[in-house]
Amino acid sequence: MTTQAGKTHVGIGILAAAALVLTALAVPAAVRADAAAAAAGAALYKEKCIGCHAADGSGNAPMGKALKAGDLRKPEIQAKKDAELAASITNGKGKMPCRPRKA
């Protein structure tokens, strides 16, 4: 902080430090939201998908083998955009039933 002709000026360093503190305070909320979304997704996968796709996504569960469920670990599946995956889940695909989003 500097003083010039009776006026006080805040240095750039102080403003940068304040911005850094505010950013640090915002990050934990985003991390908590991501963790909550991941936990909800894991619970939904366990409830609706694991029976065919198996815990590891391989499709090697007994029902998955019988229905020839896809291997979710394949690069071509992993390369799909979120919107494509959401559409497959929401609308169903092949023998996979639809799972409409809850309102």
Image: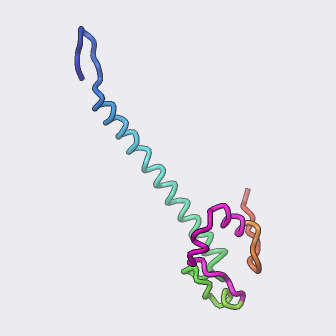
76, above or below 1, in the image: below
Left or right of 16 in this view: 31: right
Q: Residue at x 44, y 44 (%)?
A: 26
Is residue 16 highlighted in magenta? Answer: no
Q: Quadrant of residue 97?
A: bottom right
Q: Quadrant of the N terminus?
A: top left
The magenta stretch is: 67-89
Q: Is residue 91 above or below residue 74?
A: above
* Colour setup of the view: rainbow
On screen, residue 82 above or below 27 = below
Tell me if 37 is positioned left or right of 14 in this view: right
Question: In the drawing, does residue 20 fall left or right of residue 102?
Answer: left
> Which x, y percent locates residue 73?
56, 78
Residue in the foreground of this view, choosing between 38 and 72: 72
Residue 76, percent across and down? 60, 74
Image quarter of the C terminus: bottom right
Q: Residue visible at 71% across and 69% down?
A: 88
Position in image of residue 48 (x %, y %) = 67, 74
Q: Residue at x 57, y 71 (%)?
A: 78
Q: Position of residue 54 (x, y in %)?
A: 59, 83
Verify whether residue 80 appears in magenta. yes
What residue lies at 56% left-to-right and 75% top-to-bottom?
A: 75
Q: Of 76 and 21, which appears nearest the observer?
A: 76
Q: Number of numbered discs present?
A: 0
Q: Is residue 8 above or below residue 14?
A: above
